[in-house]
């Protein structure tokens, strides 16, 4: 009887510990912004921005791509005439390239977004390198990368590139799509990049997450 009571007590402690870990994990998966320098001051819009979206198009994105495209379409539509926009989709390599250009003709950007088809693995390293080169050539006073992924990938030499990007005056925000992302890694990228981390376990919330990003960037009020 004493042994049974002891086992029950141990089981209770394990359950309590597990719930505590889960709660701490849940707290980590909340929207976090690690800089407020881009938030509008007293309702005034910020100067023009140059933004490059790095979009994971691996096979696992197949059931999330529709909501992702809708959210990104709204982001593109809300960009201002003085802003510039670029899009790089990747799986194991860079697959689709929409070069950084003014948003005067948004239909070209929307067409490039609609053409993306999910397949392959997840390897964003080359995409970050190319986005860095694209933004270094921009004359915009605000340069930004938005990284959207639902998967895991190698960390080897990854943060060396992230630090190099940040030293160039480029900020980075990250969006964790679905249940199986490396959220801890994406949080760290946003923190180093002085951007925002957006969790989207349910892809249906992506539209709201990117609306927050636009407000944080000062594009909309």
Image (cartoon, rainbow, N blue to C red):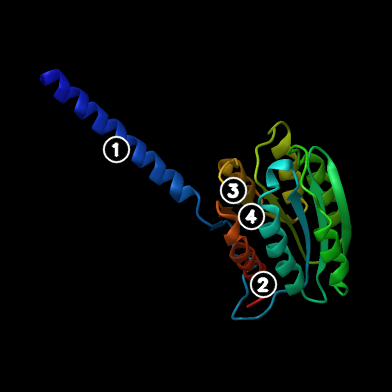
Q: CA distance from mark 2 to mark 4?
A: 15 Å
Figure label count? 4
Secondary structure state at the residue bearing disc 3:
loop
Going from N to C along the chain, the mark reached first, 3 or 1, is 1
Going from N to C along the chain, the mark reached first, 2 or 1, is 1
Confirm or deny contact between disc 4 and disc 1 (CB under 8 A): no
Q: CA distance from mark 4 to mark 1?
A: 35 Å
- In front of the other: label 3 or label 1? 3
Q: From this viewpoint, is residue 47 visible?
A: no
- In front of the other: label 4 or label 1? 1
Q: Quadrant of the C terminus?
A: bottom right
Say the numbered circle drawn on residue 16. Answer: 1
Question: From the viewer's perspective, is residue 102 above or below residue 200?
Answer: below
Q: Is residue 213 left or right of residue 25?
A: right
The residue that mark 3 highlights is 178
- Sort mark 1 into few (<14), some (14-19) or many (20+) by Cα contacts within 10 Å: few
The residue that mark 2 highlights is 218
Q: Quadrant of residue 48?
A: bottom right
Q: CA distance from mark 2 to mark 1?
A: 43 Å
Q: Is residue 165 left or right of residue 210?
A: right
The residue that mark 4 highlights is 194
Q: Quadrant of residue 47?
A: bottom right
Q: CA distance from mark 3 to mark 4?
A: 23 Å
């Amino acid at each position: 009887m004493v042994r049974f009571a002891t086992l029950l007590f141990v089981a209770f402690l394990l359950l309590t510990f597990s719930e505590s870990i889960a709660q701490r994990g849940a707290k980590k998966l909340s929207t976090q912004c690690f800089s407020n320098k881009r938030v509008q001051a007293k309702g005034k819009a910020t100067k023009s921005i140059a933004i490059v979206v790095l979009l994971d198009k691996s096979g696992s994105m197949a059931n999330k791509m529709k909501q992702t495209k809708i959210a990104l379409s709204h982001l593109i539509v809300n960009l201002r005439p003085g802003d510039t926009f670029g899009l790089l989709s990747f799986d194991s390599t860079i697959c689709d390239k929409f070069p950084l250009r003014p948003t005067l003709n948004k239909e070209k950007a929307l067409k490039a977004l609609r053409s993306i088809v999910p397949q392959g693995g997840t390897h964003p390293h080359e995409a970050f390198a190319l986005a860095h080169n694209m933004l270094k050539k921009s004359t915009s006073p605000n340069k930004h990368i938005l990284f959207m992924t639902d998967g895991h990938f190698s960390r080897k030499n990854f943060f060396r590139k992230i630090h190099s990007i940040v030293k160039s005056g480029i900020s980075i925000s990250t969006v964790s799509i679905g249940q199986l992302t490396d959220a801890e890694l994406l949080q760290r990228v946003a923190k180093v990049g002085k951007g925002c981390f957006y969790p989207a376990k349910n892809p249906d919330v992506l539209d709201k997450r990117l609306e927050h990003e636009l407000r944080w960037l000062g594009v909309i009020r």
